[in-house]
Amino acid sequence: MRNIFIIFVVVVLAIIGVLFLIRGSSQKTENESLIIKGSDTEVQLVSNLVEAFLGKNPEADISVTGGGSGVGVAALLNREINLANSSRRIKEEELLQAKSKNSDVQEFILARDGLSIIVHPENQIEKLTVDEIGKIYRGEIVNWEKVGGKDKKVELYGRQSTSGTYLFFRNLVVKDDYSPNMKNMEGSQAIVDAVKSDKNGVGYVGVGYVKDDKGSLRNDIKIVPIAKDIDSPAISPLDKDAVKKGDYPISRPIFQYLSNLPVKNSLLDKFLLFEASDQGQDIIEKTGFYALTETDIIQNQLLFEKIK
Amino acid sequence: MTLGTDKLVQHLSESLPRWLFAATAALTVILLISIFIFLFVTGINAFGSIGLKEFFWGTDWNPASFHTPSWGIFSLILGSLMVSFISLLISVPFGLSIAIYLAEIAPPKTRETLKPVIEMIASIPSVVLGLLGLLFLAPITAGLFGLSNGLNAFTASILVAVASLPTITSVSEDALSSVTYKFREASLALGATKWVTIKKAVIPAAKSGLVAAIMLGLGRVIGETMIVLMVAGNSRALPSSFLDSVQPMTATIAIEIKEVVIGTLHWQSLFAIGLVLFTITFIVNFLADLLIHKK
């Protein structure tokens, strides 16, 4: 009898404790805050945008983390975050999952990216065709000699399967499984670091990563111009117009996804408007990516019109 | 409730702490059992849907494949074993030598300062070791073997060996020190030199403790995640030499768990890998425990 009484007291105390914990944590989220997560390609870019935005709205509370587009979209569907950065378009199956969770996912185009193929500065190759890059990453070309380099083994660096860039590059260029010899790196910066110290290395990163913090071109890696096919001219991802027009063969829009339409004048709405503004697009260009095209702007406009 | 207030207070102050401590002790057991059950229940489906043979014997692990996913963890197991084997090859001779020096040769002053220093290695976070490896060790191994990069099983093994050194040294030093001094005196009295005494009397007497130290080191090594994630290179190909890059089981789980949708086969198979890992470390630790308590 006495023991039962003691157990009763302990259980009641425990329940009260748990209730307090839940209340405490739910109160915190009532402040207007924004959690952004996802693409590793976009993480530096979006951080720069947030920094500028906070300069104008110091009371806002915004956090940005990476992890990969897949991680961001998964977190968005699990309602853990407000905005998912994604360097690839959302997949059909992810949209179906969203529907089953009563999310009306919205797409916002953030910027234009020219996916850049990088090698060590000592590598002699002058250009590559899309077909050659595919063969290199499928493991069919294993020596630089085959594409105009020295007689050295190719060392492949790529991203992990959580990455949107991994999937985009595979679907557009590799069109098959990556060679199992490819080293799967944690992020775009890890690829840049690996390639700059590996004379036989090759990697792929968003164009924002071929420039340093100050916006000038890095000289410890070399950007390879790319030709659509053997008869076409090779184009550099640094050619802004070619990337925006889609003449650069592996150019792409990079996105942000919302789980639902935001409320008018909410923090999320204001932040998206800021990103789309001239000031926002200016920051995008300074970070090394490219501003939106006419059609992108029209698509974003349709999104903003739906927000009421 | 016929108890007086005083009596109740007295009773509570006596029995509440007892209850509390018993509950915390029970919690660890419950925790272990529930983790095992959770791993087993979530992982077992994967064995069923993939097939044991393909799962353990298949050499291609590619759940996010462009074509049909493949689920063979053989090269992942091989990666884990390779890193464990090479790192033990490094850390066991080092660890045992240090332990013999500390227990048998070093003067008490040296011993009192050196042992905590070695145990201090355990306090270096493995992410720091990984970073040092990425920045300094990988270029060195690359230069040493004429490779263009040093992201391979060998580089990772050296770092993992460093991480396991304190475990091996500390446990074997304890084993050597706990050998009774009578053995040493008897051996010396028979005219044996110090070295012969160590070799013929002390080490055989401490054998089970030394093996246990190696086992505990193995348990530490095979579960190491951060170091291998950072420097082992993470490529899925079946490694053919210790200079190939590998993707051990731990790194695979750490990389892929972030993106999987809960409940899918991919999710279940990551838990199946976790179950394999857990089983290996459990057996290793269990054997080590048996050996330590065997007198």
Image: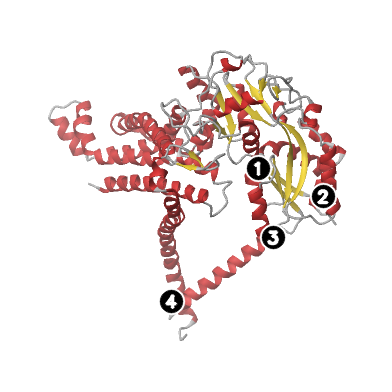
> Which residue is most to the front?
A231
> Which residue is most to the left?
B190
- Residue B269: horizontal and vertical position, in percent? 47, 48
Residue plotted at (76% across, 32% down): A289
Query: How far apart, in angstroms, are the residues tagged by discs 4 and 2?
Result: 63 Å
Earlier in the chain: of badge 4 and badge 2, it is 4
Camera sees residue B211 = yes
- Are both tags, 1 and 2, on one chain? yes
- Residue B80: horizontal and vertical position, in percent? 42, 37
Earlier in the chain: of badge 3 and badge 4, it is 4
Query: How far apart, in angstroms, are the residues tagged by discs 1 and 2?
Result: 21 Å
Earlier in the chain: of badge 1 and badge 2, it is 1
Q: Which secondary structure lies at badge 2?
A: helix
> Dot 3 surroundings within 10 Å: few (below 14), some, or many (20 or more)?
few
- Are both tags, 2 and 3, on one chain? yes
The residue at which mark 2 appears reads as A303
Earlier in the chain: of badge 1 and badge 4, it is 4
Q: Is residue B1 left or right of residue B191?
A: right
- Residue B209: horizontal and vertical position, in percent? 28, 41
The residue at which mark 4 appears reads as A3
The residue at which mark 1 appears reads as A69
The amino acid type of the residue labelled 3 equals Asn
Query: How far apart, in angstroms, are the residues tagged by discs 1 and 4?
Result: 54 Å
The residue at which mark 3 appears reads as A102
